[in-house]
Image (tube, coloured by chain):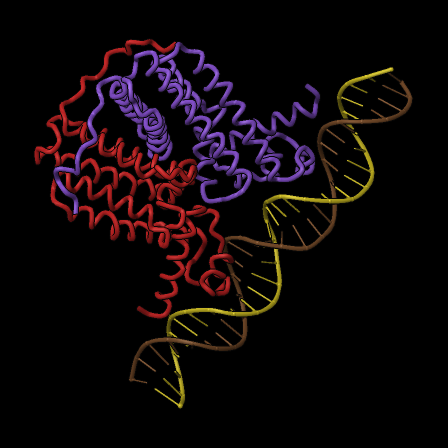
Chain colours: A red, B purple, C yellow, D brown
Amino acid sequence: MSKGEETRAAILDEAVAEASRFGLEALTIGQLAQRVGLSKSGLFAHFGSKEDLQLQVLESAVARFVERVVAPGLRAARGVPRVRSLFEHWLAWEQDAALLPGGCVFITLANELDDRPGPLRDRLVGYQRDWIEALATAARIAVEEGHFRAGLDTAQFAHDFYSVFLAYHHFNRLLREPRAEERARRAFDHLVAAAAGPDVPDPEPPAHPAP
Amino acid sequence: MSKGEETRAAILDEAVAEASRFGLEALTIGQLAQRVGLSKSGLFAHFGSKEDLQLQVLESAVARFVERVVAPGLRAARGVPRVRSLFEHWLAWEQDAALLPGGCVFITLANELDDRPGPLRDRLVGYQRDWIEALATAARIAVEEGHFRAGLDTAQFAHDFYSVFLAYHHFNRLLREPRAEERARRAFDHLVAAAAGPDVPDPEPPAHPAP
DNA sequence: GACAAAATAGAACGACCGTCCCAGACTCTC
DNA sequence: GAGAGTCTGGGACGGTCGTTCTATTTTGTC
């Protein structure tokens, strides 16, 4: 790795960490340069523009996520072990304070970009869809393996899976709730148990109407 | 209402809408002034500082939330009707594009402020705790009414309730998933059904260990 | 070790930010 | 309708932002 690539990687590492706390818009060339010990223009020379920097930060975060969560998660045995492994590695990712002092950077970016059209948002959405699809696929394989019941709505399972993680992020990072992880694990266990057990018939119009 | 109070209210309405999309930091005096048809200094005179403006925006949003969600939600009959009513009004709040073009402003602020210590964060956390406690209380009353099973972990119920909403926000606003509401309602119905039904014993260490 | 290429620093730019001061316009009350 | 008090606009301030240009240092190769 040449000198230039080395510093570029160091910049992106620092930028990803920063983005996990404050997002991509709050990234400033000057502050980032100071953190990595460069001059403003010295850092800027590595990127054509701020938007290019932001895009590279996103790509870098995705590469890390694949390396730290997706790949090891998929290495577990097909079925429920893999579903659980994905959850465990995702939790570890969220908790890696050295890499992501603000927790999962994609949740931060999701909230920052959800009302900001542009290439950044488009890419993030694409990656998010891929990840949710991967969760649904893991559930589908669990059905094939007989761990989950036949006919399980795997897209709903992926939705509920993601839901547990979003709540963990919220309760852990905003509310600093000590029992956040415990609550998330309980919710996840119930989710897995419900997917394994028999289908619950869709409730007819609620017994207690809500005005 | 005097002229001053009137324009101050107009400013705050516009600011809450803006904050629901981009947060409190992205609010700028100049752009806000332009939107409400004031000069920069004319608007600024209503607030001693930007932080004061941000605080008033938060307070204004809370007042609206109480008026639009909490109060009408609590008006429903004790028990499951009230739990469902809170959910319905919360959904309507999230979907009110005129008031909150970026969806629930508190979710946006939660993600913006979760790593930014200060009075803004402190207040938001306080309000969030109140709201989650209100959800838990509604669940506790449903237990008393015999709608939910005795021994239900109402704090976990509130957590899972919030979890459904966070997922709705994510799938609806970032991914623009057309079935987001349907998924959220299904998750919520299952949550209510599970709280009404018999307790599921905490699963022993998973049958399929995850490496 | 010389030399081209790559990497970094320094200084300056226009734009916009929050904030302040002050004068003029408007509102409301008697 | 006059006058005190409230509200608003214009202009300027120092600061920071992204960006550009140019010079200087450092790197990698023969």
Q: Does residue A52 appear in this view?
A: no
- Name the residue located 16 percent from the left edge and 42 percent from the top edge: A82
Q: Position of residue A119 (x, y in %)?
A: 38, 44
- B157 or A140, which lies in front? B157
Question: Farthest residue toward the front?
Answer: B151
- Name the residue located 47 percent from the left edge and 65 percent from the top edge: A37
Quadrant the N terminus of chain B occupies: top right
Q: Position of residue B115 (x, y in %)?
A: 46, 44
In the figure, residue C19 lies in which quadrant? top right
Q: Does residue B191 appear in this view?
A: yes
Q: Position of residue D9 (x, y in %)?
A: 72, 35
Position above or below: D4 against A27? above
In the figure, residue A15 lies in which quadrant? bottom left
- Name the residue located 61 percent from the left edge and 25 percent from the top edge: B9
- Name the residue located 58 percent from the left edge and 37 percent from the top edge: B31
**Is residue D11 left or right of B7 when viewed as pictured?**
right
**Is residue C8 left or right of A86 when viewed as pictured?**
right
Q: Position of residue A175 (x, y in %)?
A: 43, 37
Count the labels in the image: 0
**Is residue A114 left or right of B31 when viewed as pictured?**
left
**Is residue B86 left or right of A188 when viewed as pictured?**
right
